[in-house]
Every structure is written in C-alpha cells, then in structure tokens.
Image (tube, rainbow, N blue to C red):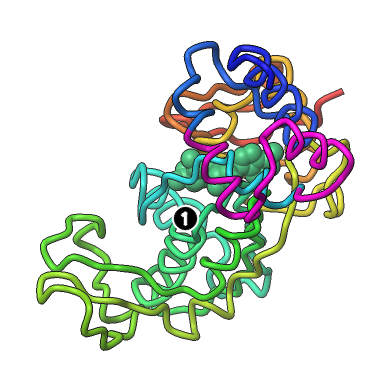
Amino acid sequence: MASDRVLHERVKKILYSLTGITLAENKDIMIANRLHKLKRDTKYTGDIDHLLDAIEEGSFTMEFINSFTTNKTHFFREEFHFTDLRDRVLPQFANSGRDVKMYCSASSTGEEPYSMAMTVLETQDLLNSRINASIIATDIDTNVLQYAANGVYRYAKSSKEFPNWIKPPKFFKRRVNKTLTTEEILIKVKPELQKMVTFQVNNLNDSSYPFQKDYFDVIFCRNVLIYFSSEDQNKILKRLFSHLKIGGTLYLGHSENPHDLVNYVDRIGQNIFIKKKEYN
Ligand SMILES: C[S@@+](CC[C@H](N)C(=O)[O-])C[C@H]1O[C@@H](n2cnc3c(N)ncnc32)[C@H](O)[C@@H]1O
C-alpha cells in the first residue's frame, strides 16, 4: 500500500483533473477524512489504492467528486449583495416586460438561489409590481443539488440567519418532524420560490458552459473561486463573464477578486461589479 504522502498526492491529482479544485498543502487530515467517507459511500471493501485505480478508470466519479467538495453555505450569506439586488438591480425590471435572468454558479444546498428568489418576491411586494425572474442554479456536486431541489431545511427558532426584512413563514411551510427538538423545526420552501429556480449540474472548470453568450443579467459566483488556483480562477471568471450582459451585475465572495476583468467592470460596492464591456 502507498504511503500517505503518495496517496494524498494521487488524490489531489485526480481531484484536480475532475473538478479543477486545488487542495492546499496542509489538507492531510481533510483528505484522510474524505477518503474514509468515499469508502463508506461507495461501499468499497478493497484497499484505497484499488479504489483510486477504479476512479481513474471512470468508476465512482460522482461519489469521488461529492466526497471532496466543501458545501458550507447559509441563507442570505453576505446580505449586502441581496440588498443591492433588491434596491438597485430588480427595480429596473419591475413592470418592464423584461425578464431578469440570474445565475447562481455554485449553489451548494440551495440557500443562495432561494435567497435570490425570496429577494425577488420581496421586491415585488415592496414595489407593488410584477418582476419576471428566472434563476439557474448549478453545482458540480449532485448530492447538494438533490438536497436543494427538495428544498427542506432545518431551522432553529433562535436563528439570526434571515435578515429582518425577510419573514420566513412567507416563504416556507413548516414540516412536522418528531425527531427534532422544540427549538428546531423543518421548513420547506413554498412552490412560488421553487418554481423560480432550476437546478442542474455544471462544472465551472469545463471549457464551456451550456448557456448562451450575454444571457444573464446577474451572476452570483461566491465562495467557490477560493478552491481554484489563481490561473484557473481567472479562466473561470472570463468564461462566466462571457455569459453576462453588458450592464449586468457580477457578485463575488468576500475573499475573491475579478483578476483580469478589473478593467472591464465598474466596482460599485463590496465585491459587486457591473460589466462595462466585453473582455477580449
Ligand atoms: C463553499 S460552497 C459556496 C456556496 C455558496 N455559493 C455560498 O457562497 O454560500 C462551494 C460550492 O462550490 C461547489 N464547487 C466546487 N467545485 C466546483 C466546480 N468545479 N464546479 C461547480 N461547482 C463547484 C461545491 O460543490 C460547493 O457546493
């Protein structure tokens, strides 16, 4: 059996080739834990080297990817992006007859695209006018996409996850579940939100994406670029950018930056960028 060092280098190589994710040097404990999960999920009884052989030959690809993604997220993460959407972007589409097309490019378990959808419905009510919106939400991890499409979440009554301008009972139905404590309940997103969001698989590291050029008015790409090398972040951003309309808005995560796009955007807020011209 290969030493841990050799094994971990092999895992990193496979992960990079399948997802573009670059794991840092100090991730030995994480890799060991994720390999353990992978063996459990695949029910593989042989040794780990043989499991990696099988993955390199094309088996268990999905299980491997799903084991190695980090899916941390929550509703209204970096709330100021949603208030910008509410106060600046969406009013432009109210009663305009134009659809606002939004893309959530690493949607994880769905809290981010559903927060976008809640923001649309809330803005409609605030302005007392109709906004036609559609949200495409993608991720590379098929488990989180399934979870997101199901739309059921744990909710602690004391939670501060939702901002004060969002009232959860307006957007979620309460689910009875006897196994949870009285402090925690299950909530399910209402159909009005669910029908606004389409979930599908997309690997941001693929050389092209299944969307038309200049299609989206809004792109959220938050807290995912951090998993890629600087060079790959730049490539992903340029690909995403080609699908954003001129005048459209790009939202990045708190520790991400627009790299080579810096001269092609106007920065109008904390990691909020408006596309001013095509990148070429
Ligand atoms: C930390 S979560 C961020 C979720 C959300 N955007 C947020 O800000 O809360 C990162 C997500 O990126 C996804 N991801 C990682 N590599 C990806 C890739 N190559 N293509 C698409 N999604 C990827 C992971 O599966 C994970 O769900």
Q: Is residue 50 left or right of residue 256?
A: right
- Above or below: residue 266 compared with residue 223: above
Residue occupying image coordinates x 20% and y 74%: 180
133 falls in the magenta region: no
Residue 247 appears in the figure? no
The residue that mark 1 highlights is 112
Q: In the image, which residues are magenta?
A: 33-60
**Residue 95, position as x, y percentages in the image:** 56, 75
What is the quadrant of the N terminus in the image? Answer: top right
Residue 213 appears in the figure? yes
**Mark 1 within 8 Å of ligand 1, using the beta carbon:** yes
Q: Is residue 59 left or right of residue 140?
A: right
Residue occupying image coordinates x 60% and y 52%: 104
Q: Nearer the viewer, residue 234 or 165?
A: 234
**Residue 171, position as x, y percentages in the image:** 35, 78
Q: Amino acid at mark 1?
A: Glu
